[in-house]
Image (cartoon, rainbow, N blue to C red):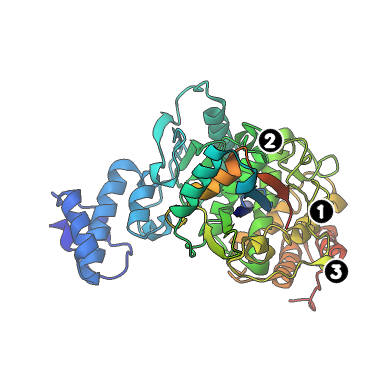
Amino acid sequence: MKVTVVRSGGVAGMVLTVEVDAAELDADAAAQLRGLVDACEFGDGPPSVIADGFGYEVAVERDDGTVERSRFGQGGAPPGAGALASWVIDGPHGHRSAGR
Amino acid sequence: MCATGPVGGLRHTPGVIGCRCEIAPPTLLLAVAEAGDPDVRDAALRTLLTSAALRSRRATLGPTLRRLGLSPADLAFLPAEATAAGPENTVYDVAGGEEAALPGRRVRGTTDPPSGDAAVDEAFDGAAETAAFYREVFGRDSIDGRGLDLVSSVHFGRRYDNAFWTGDQMVYGDGGGGVFVAGGLTRALDVVAHELTHGVVQFSAGLQYRGQSGALNESFSDVFGVLVAQRAAGTDAASASWLVGEGTLEPSLGRALRSMIAPGTAYAGDDQPADMDSYADLPVDDDPRNDNGGVHINSGIPNRAFAEAARALGGNAWETVGPVWYEVLTGGRLSRVADFEDCAALTVAVAGERYGGGSAEQDAVRGGWEEVRVRLRADPR
Ligand SMILES: [Zn+2]
């Protein structure tokens, strides 16, 4: 399973992409990730209505190739999607890249 | 009783403002506002907001307004808060909380000494400096032009790499999340003034945050953001770096968020175009990669038009081209959906009104837009 989070906007206006591959994680971190994915309600939330609010896309690719996706603005995450996005972006496990 | 005032929109109702009689308890009015038919709802809301505003000043009402789906603009019927002392300047600590926890705990007010927390004191000083700029340079009374109190919350989220204007207050993360250096967001006066200028844009031209009007919204924030910093530092147009947020990024990423004079050169991966030939024609959709149609990308084009005009004239940019851009933003002629050509035509017209047709200033403004290859229509006069 791979989880990819794209975060754009903000005052910096940068696009940040962070990818986590469950196969590269230790058992504890992999279980945490699975728990967050299971708790995530996919589907879209409202876009940010404020200038320089972040925009997000969270995509989960399962081992069988199916993909689930959620897009939302800062403060508008569907249940579970915000926690999953923060874990991926702020945690130590992601591969980060900048650019569109 | 006061709650049965005239019905209609939330407009100024003289009898309500001056009312000194007993009013219904706020909780009852809130229940009425949330449950009543539209006319009753409006009357209850107006009474509630008026009494609350008279007690506690309008800017502290942000959370209540948001719950009711209103913005500070809906309180325009209240008397302006202008006083000789200027607007109140208050900083709150939201202590790692996010939207639901705003504004947080009050930690510094207008007349309080420095708190010792750098984020608190920088947010305080940045708001004061920005308000002083608008008052002293353009005679504007705070963000809304009507004395709106300055409210800032610091320590938003954890290692949060953003600062933003919510529609009624400033919010700052601590940075340190991989993009901004820790403390960078409050330390940079041009970033603080950029965000507060989003408030000025909201209360003036109200440029839609998508496509070219959104890129203009971003550009006005960069323009006045750097002008606030240039004036505070006494830097003229020739010696200015024209960088936005210099030193705020993790050094491995680059030296600044944007370069107004050389868009696309501020950091590794900066993809701002420097002129219309490389305009990024991105769709306006919900894909975050498209940035609402490139609002932070194509803003480099009007940014550079301004910087080129200011450099051509020399002197202090806030005294030369700045007043032209300010009149365009606030003078009522720039549409919410203006594009680059609309903005360019207006700046040339306003430069002519202010400095004379064929003046050096008007030539410099026209030259700035020519430099970035924005088409100038036939003289709008
Ligand atoms: Zn902005």
State the residue position of label 1.
B264
Task: Tell me, yes or no, if residue B128 can be seen here.
Answer: yes
Chain letter of mark 3 equals B
Rate crowding at label 2 as few (under 14), some (14 to 19) or many (20 or more) other CA atoms within 10 Å.
some
Reply above or below: A34 against B366. above
Q: Position of residue B55 (x, y in %)?
A: 28, 42
Give the camera-side residue of B200 and B30. Answer: B30
**Alpha-carbon distance for marks 3 and 1?**
14 Å
For marks 2 and 3, the one nearer the N-term is 2
Q: Which mark is residue B277?
A: 3
Discs 2 and 1 share one subunit: yes
Q: Chain of mark 1?
A: B
Q: Looking at the picture, which amino acid does disc 1 mark?
A: Gly
Q: Residue at x 24, y 54 (%)?
A: B48
Q: Position of residue B1 (x, y in %)?
A: 12, 57
Nearer to us of marks 2 and 3 is: 3
Q: Tell me where residue B224 appears, x and y as whole percent.
A: 67, 49
Q: Amino acid at mark 3?
A: Asp
Residue that mark 2 sits on? B232
Which quadrant holds the C terminus of chain B? bottom right
- Please report, as a chain letter, where disc 2 is located: B
Q: Which picture quadrant has residue B4?
A: bottom left
Q: Amino acid at mark 2?
A: Ala
Which is nearer the eye, B133 or A54? A54
